[in-house]
Image (tube, rainbow, N blue to C red):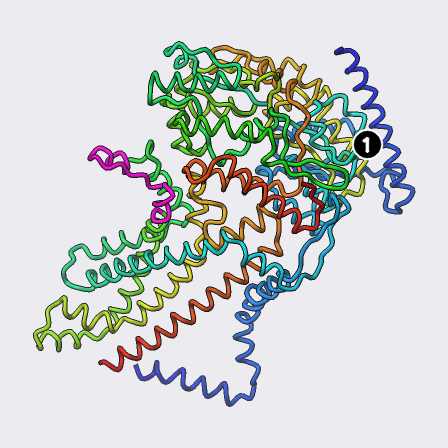
Amino acid sequence: MRLTTRTARVAAMALAGAFAVTGLAACSTSDDGGSAADGEPVEIDFWGWVPGLEDLVAQWNDENPDIQVSFHRMTGDDGQKVEAAVDAGAGPDLVQLSTHNLPDYVIAGRVQDITEYVADDESNYTASSWASVSFDGQVYGVPQGIGPAATMYRTDILDEYGIEMPTTWDEYVDAARELHEANPDVYIANMSPSEIGQWSQEIQQAESSWYGIDGDSWTVGVNDAGSQLVAERWQTLLDEGLVTTEQVWTPEYWALVNNGTIATVTYAAWFPSLLAENAADTSGLWAIAPMPKNAGSDNSGDSGGAAVVVLAGAENPGAAAEFASWLNGSDDTQEALITVGGLFPSTINGLASDALLTESEFYGGQVINEVFIESAEQTPATWVDGPNYGTAQTAITDEFAKVVNGDLTFLEALDNAQAITVADLEDRGLNVSE
Amino acid sequence: MTAVTARPTASRRRFTGAGKPWVPYLFVAPFVLLFLVFLVSPIIVAVWNSLFSQQSSGLGFGGTTTAFVGLDNFARALSDQDFLVSFGRVALYGLVQVPVMMFIAATLALLFDSALVRGRRFFQFAAFLPYAVPGVIAALLWGFLYQPSVSPLIQALSSIGVDANLLAPGTVLWSIANVSIWSYTGINMIIMFAALQAIPREIYEAARIDGASDLRIAVGIKLPMIAPAVLLTTLSSIIGTLQLFNEPQVLKNVTANISSDYTPNMAIYAASTLGKDPNLASAMAVILGVATLIVSVVVLRLNNRTTKRASDGL
């Protein structure tokens, strides 16, 4: 199994390289400005935020005198800056992007279709990450990192009250009741109305999606069956007073985590290191288990990842795609991306890397990534990002705030958010099928 | 003294006599230029943008076209319930926050102007200091004080049996108002205090001879005489209220009870940045601008009438 993917990947790399060369050749013959023919190297501008990219770019530049990449560090997903730069014709050739925003870039024509250069990389990527960069059969980026979910839990608290870490959501609700009954100051989880990633990972687990494509129309599923399943679960936990409702990332939240008010946190693979940082005093008390499952399913969830995309202004999309393909998929880069970059890989060779399998003291010596690797393998490739992710996200979080105040139910909130999202797409002239 | 006053007169005469009518324009040019570039042209651009819309078709992957839609964006903005509610919210906020702040600022200014306060310079500085703290930092700071587990304030209250939730849906607006009052009372106090200092002392002497108490002087003489300063600060506070953004946007990070369209400015930000609809946001910004203009004109009218009445009364 491993051998075949590896072989396929090498073949894919060779093919991608060949495509890139033909792309370059085409460029240099049709354009009088084609620099490759003059012996001048092709220059690629790349903006990104992952730590350690400077070293990887330097390595590439040493090995590839024909394609020289210059790197500019962003502080994070500088959404508006990149959009403005591209629209003003001053954007880089390559940029790192949250995949949730990719459809907007495609619709606004800010990214190039790079299917011909990278299509053969597909076998080296997880199905869900590849789906996140593909629209309508075309590929618009190379995935870079994903966020498979798992549950971090306080072993000391669960042990104290004789509760096993639940493996299904039904068990989880029971455990929530048991725990809160045993100690009214302890809650099994925090339901933050604004932490959209914690919501969407469970939507994905339920094989639902906020968006979908049906022929020539978008579908909007903010309140679809899977979302309703998740909504009913959290409504129960909320109605029975079994969860706290603080905003994640606030001092208040970390105080509740540190003092043992919150017993479990279900979130993406990048969360454990932040938990260790913000709750250092609880070191050794945590462990990580697979996120609870829905009845009759092994699915796990993912809150989204990033991709490297070729922007509209790039004159040499082939060369840019070749670099992106190497950066995210090469055997040479996986360890650095994992250890220095802190990425959870979206690549098959990355997931097989030993760099992932280190023991973590904070989690009692557990090799925590084994859980996340399994989660990545169990994530269904059903999630589709759509236009105006921002509008759907804002609508949902604003409505959820009313839910935790008791003014609405989750189901009503989802119906409202659905209506807002559909209206927004229709206002833009997009086809929406109900 | 005479030499100093004579000089400007002489030079003014020299200018008009020199026959270079373009010179004054040269001097106002930097202002006019910056005014046109940074105020007038953005307004024109916003009005222009508000008349268009980015339209796609099908799945949208064919790209977008810009279509003229007339006043559609204005209709959309005005039919957005939450946007209208945000105006009502800042109006309610302004009705409470501005008078409270003005009352505190005026009281402090009168106290500092009286002989009652010892260590006046220190307290004046202390009252002014929060203004030197940038609005975002002030909101971050108070954000900590509003969170029960990390707030000495709430812990102190709960130790005397008061359970305060300063971030609840019903209280969060006043928690924001508190940050603004803390930040801006000082500057308003200074402006009023400066106006008080300009009042000739003889008037107080005359009042005292007539048997007026300090309180009577403060309410009957000082306040009416600094009415223009009070109304100026009130006007800028009202405009500040309509533009409310920093404090709620920062506090939004610690509570979900501040929605993304909590104030008109936040709604505009949400439409442009989160919703990626700059055309709709332009229309909303124009509506907010017009609303601010109307409120300003009304307040200025009241101001003129009140100052006229005050000066008539004297």
Chain hosting mark 1? A
Specify whether residue A341 is in view: no
Is residue B44 magenta-colored? no
Residue A358, position as x, y percentages in the image: 57, 13
Is residue B170 magenta-colored? yes
For the view shown, which residue lies furthest in the bottom direction? Answer: B17
Mark 1 surroundings within 10 Å by alpha-carbon count, few (fewer than 14), some (14 through 19), many (20 or more): many
Q: Could you say whether the residue bearing mark 1 is in a helix, strand or loop?
A: helix
Q: Amino acid at mark 1?
A: Tyr
Q: Quadrant of residue A128?
A: top right
Residue A107, position as x, y percentages in the image: 72, 44
Q: Compared to B220, does A233 lie above or below?
A: above
Report the side of A413 relative to A142 (left or right). left
Residue identified by numbered label 1: A117
Report the side of A425 relative to B27 (left or right). right
Q: Quadrant of residue A184?
A: top left
Report the side of A409 relative to B206 (left or right). right
